Structures are given as structure tokens and as C-alpha cells.
Amino acid sequence: MSLDYQCPLCQQSLTLQVNVLKCSNNHSFDRAKEGYVNLLPVQQKNSKQPGDNLDMVQARRAFLTTGHYQFLQTAIAERVATHSPQCVIDLGCGEGFYTQAIANACDAKVYGVDISKSAIKYAAKRYDNCNFSVASISQAPFNDEMADVLVSIFAPLFDAELARLAKPDSKLIVASPGPWHLKELKQYIYRDVNAHTAINVPSGFELIEQTLLEQQISVPFNDVKNLITMTPFAWKFRPEHWQLLEQQGEQVVTLSFYVSQFTRLTDSL
Ligand SMILES: C[S@@+](CC[C@H](N)C(=O)[O-])C[C@H]1O[C@@H](n2cnc3c(N)ncnc32)[C@H](O)[C@@H]1O
Ligand SMILES: [Zn+2]
């Protein structure tokens, strides 16, 4: 099997030798028993446990298995498949919920990369139709112009890296929160809930399509708890907010997502 990774220390290509990836400068990276590779050198770690922690990963997994985000998963996988890509990279892939659906929908070699080891371990254990790595997407361990489609779902965007990884005319598909995403939950902690706006066009790309996908769901406390725990505003919920939510029982929640498609501009290369 060939894996097209780049050494995070010297940017030379890595070759797989049994279960070790090595570059010509003899930097080597083991493949874990779960099948993923750890390409995050200590000097790129900004904390002991960068990215989403195990609690967030487990909460996200538990919530995603309820099926409430399946309409987004399908929309993303279908959009990627229309481009008949050979290589797709899901940047900030978490535990691979969207990555594996993309791999099922098209014939491409699909890479999922995330800085959270807990998330990647989980992804690699479950899905063997993708190639997972622990790495930073601010210095992604892939060669220039490698991807036909880049995917980013609720993950940070690093414009220069996106432009570097994208083939000419390739596509970038981004899911980001729509105007009133989770507004009923935010009302517990914010006096005024501000509407999310669509993301800015990353430099070197042009917007070709933007869709707003929305659904209202009614979910029991346990699902609400997981939905909040998997978001960055979970730490704002104090015991009294949790208590109110629990008393409420079933909770109506607005799910709202922008799905934006961009194309790599060739004249800015
Ligand atoms: C909100 S989660 C979304 C995960 C996944 N795309 C999903 O929607 O299920 C954001 C993800 O970005 C990852 N992340 C944040 N900063 C990163 C970085 N610099 N490099 C790689 N991954 C990063 C986090 O670890 C987390 O898994
Ligand atoms: Zn190297």
C-alpha cells in the first residue's frame, strides 16, 4: 500500500517500510496498531493533549450515532462524489464520521487528519477505508497539490495550507455553522445570541456554491448533553444550566449548516 505523506520535520516524502514511515533524512514515524500514523512532532504540539479531548470525542461519537447529523453527512459525501476525485483530504476530521462516508461514496484515496490523538485512534479503529493521521493541519503532512477535493467540517481553516494542498481547479468543501445553529441551547448561556455568518472565501479560492441546510429536532436530555459536550461552548454551562436542561426533558434544537463549495483559482498559482 502506498501512503503519500510528507515528513513533518523536513518535508521530504515518507515511504512505508513494514510499519514505519521513513524519509530520506531518516526521520521515522511508527504506524500504530490501529493503522494510523502519528506525524505530530513534539515541537508542533502546543499542549500535552492538543485538539479535542476524549470526553469531546466520545460525546461527539455518541451524538452522531443518533443519526441527527446524517443529512449533513449525506450532503457532504454526495458533493465530494460529484467531482469523481482520486484524492480527498478531510482536514480536522475528528473521529471520521464524515471521512468514512466520503470514502464509501467515491473511489478516491481518502485521508483524514486531526491533531487529536483520541479522535484519530477512534477513527482508525472503526474505519479501514480511510488513511488516518495525527498531525496539525496548519502544517499538514502532505505534498503540494495533492488533493482533488479538500474537506473541512467545523474545523479551523488555514488558507495558505489549503492553497498549497489543492490541485489546480480542485474543490474545497466547507461545513460551518448556519445563522441560528443550536440557538435554543445558546439561549441558556448568552443573553443575546448572535447569528453566525457564512465563512470568508479562503484566499486563492472562489465560491461556486453555498447551501444552507436546516432542520429542527426534538431530543431527550442525554442527546442534548452530548451535543453540548462536543462543542467548544460546553465549558460555559454551569450546574444550574445543566439542571434546567434536565428538567426540560425533550428539547427542540435548531441544526443549521452552511455547506460552501470553492474552487482553486488557477490564475493565483
Ligand atoms: C468541531 S471538531 C470537528 C470534527 C469533525 N470534522 C466532525 O465534524 O465530526 C474540530 C476538530 O478540529 C481539530 N483541530 C483543531 N485544531 C487543529 C489543528 N491545528 N490541526 C488538526 N486538527 C485540528 C480538533 O481536534 C477537532 O477534532
Ligand atoms: Zn524528514
Image (cartoon, rainbow, N blue to C red):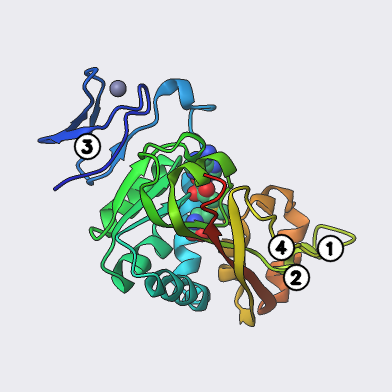
Give the left or right position of residue 31, taking residue 114 as reference.
Answer: left
Q: Quadrant of residue 77?
A: bottom left
Q: State the CA–CA distance, disc 4 to disc 1.
A: 16 Å
Whether residue 59 appears in this view of the structure is no
Q: State the CA–CA distance, disc 3 to disc 4.
A: 38 Å
Mark 4 or mark 1, whichever is nearer to me: 4
Give the left or right position of residue 165, taking residue 249 as reference.
Answer: left
Tell me the residue at 44%/61% (across/down): 61
Q: Secondary structure under badge 4?
A: loop
Residue type, numbered disc 4: Ala
N-term-proximal mark, 4 vs 1: 1
Residue topped by disc 2: 180
N-term-proximal mark, 3 vs 1: 3
Residue topped by disc 4: 198
N-term-proximal mark, 2 vs 1: 2
Residue type, numbered disc 3: Arg
Q: Position of residue 101 (x, y in %)?
A: 36, 69
N-term-proximal mark, 2 vs 3: 3
State if disc 1 and disc 2 touch (CB < 8 Å): yes
Residue type, numbered disc 1: Val
Residue topped by disc 3: 31
Q: Does ligand 1 reach within 8 Å of label 2's beta carbon? A: no
Decide: few, some or many residues near mark 4? Use Cα within 10 Å; few <14, some 14-19, many ≥20. some
Q: State the CA–CA distance, disc 2 to disc 1.
A: 8 Å
- The image shows residue 59, relative to residue 133, as above or below, that is below
Give the left or right position of residue 207, taking residue 120 as reference.
Answer: right
Residue topped by disc 1: 193
